[in-house]
Image (spheres, rainbow, N blue to C red):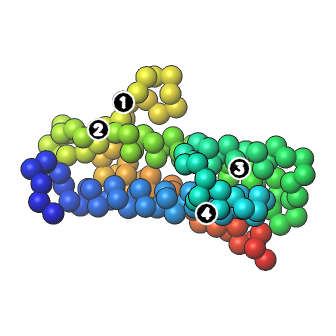
Amino acid sequence: MRTRVPYDPAYTALLGTAVYVFAYYEWAVIYLIQQFKPGFVGRYCQGAPMTSGKVRQELEAVLKDPGTSYTAVRKAELQGCLDQFARLIGRRNALIHAHPITNHDGAQILSYQTNVERPLPDMKWPVAEVEAAIRAFDDAACATNALLHRLLK
């Protein structure tokens, strides 16, 4: 596609992969919640829009519910899943809320700036950082799917 905006097609393809892999990961979390809260997928799809933060709160509610049964998945595993999801939401947000810059080497990349009290302060997103985020999202998606498949047995 042609545009007058300067960009690197390989870099923007990588950004698209990062967004897609996180979306896949988030759906693994949503289906995991569904196993504890039947009807959650329908509520997610047809109810009021939910941010990733709201999905995180739903998973947290599963952990806080004294009626949650931990037969196929241990509570510590579900807590680890929640903790990882919370961290990766912040990382994904730092990527999608970044703005384009010309890096010192002339590359067109994204840069994220926020106040220093946030978990991820100012950072650049060169190719290596985007690839690292994709690996983190991918690893988390696979770990979450492993928990999900244990619940589906």
- 142 vs 128, nearest the viewer: 142
Task: Read off the residue under disc 1.
Answer: 113
Q: Is residue 37 visible?
A: yes
Residue drawn 90% across the image and 47% down it: 66
Residue that protrudes farthest toward the left in the picture: 4
Residue drawn 29% across the image and 61% down it: 13
Is residue 28 placed above or below 8 in the rendered structure? below
The 10 Å Cα crowd at callout 2, few under 14, some 14 to 19, many 20 or more, is some
- Where disc 2 sits, the SS reads strand
Q: CA distance from mark 4 to mark 1?
A: 29 Å
Provide residue 131's location: percent of width, then percent of height: 38, 56
Type of amino acid under label 4: Ala
Q: CA distance from mark 3 to mark 4?
A: 12 Å
Q: Is residue 140 visible?
A: no
The 10 Å Cα crowd at callout 3, few under 14, some 14 to 19, many 20 or more, is many
Type of amino acid under label 3: Leu
- Where disc 3 sits, the SS reads helix
Q: Of marks 1 and 3, which one's residue comes earlier in the chain? A: 3
Q: Of marks 2 and 3, which one's residue comes earlier in the chain? A: 3
Q: CA distance from mark 2 to mark 3?
A: 30 Å
User: Does residue 2 appear left or right of residue 62 in this picture?
Assistant: left
Task: Read off the residue under disc 4.
Answer: 28
Task: Read off the residue under disc 2.
Answer: 99
Provide residue 70's location: percent of width, then percent of height: 86, 59
Residue drawn 52% across the image and 63% down it: 24
Cβ atoms at labels 1 and 2 below 8 Å apart: yes
Task: Read off the residue under disc 3.
Answer: 59
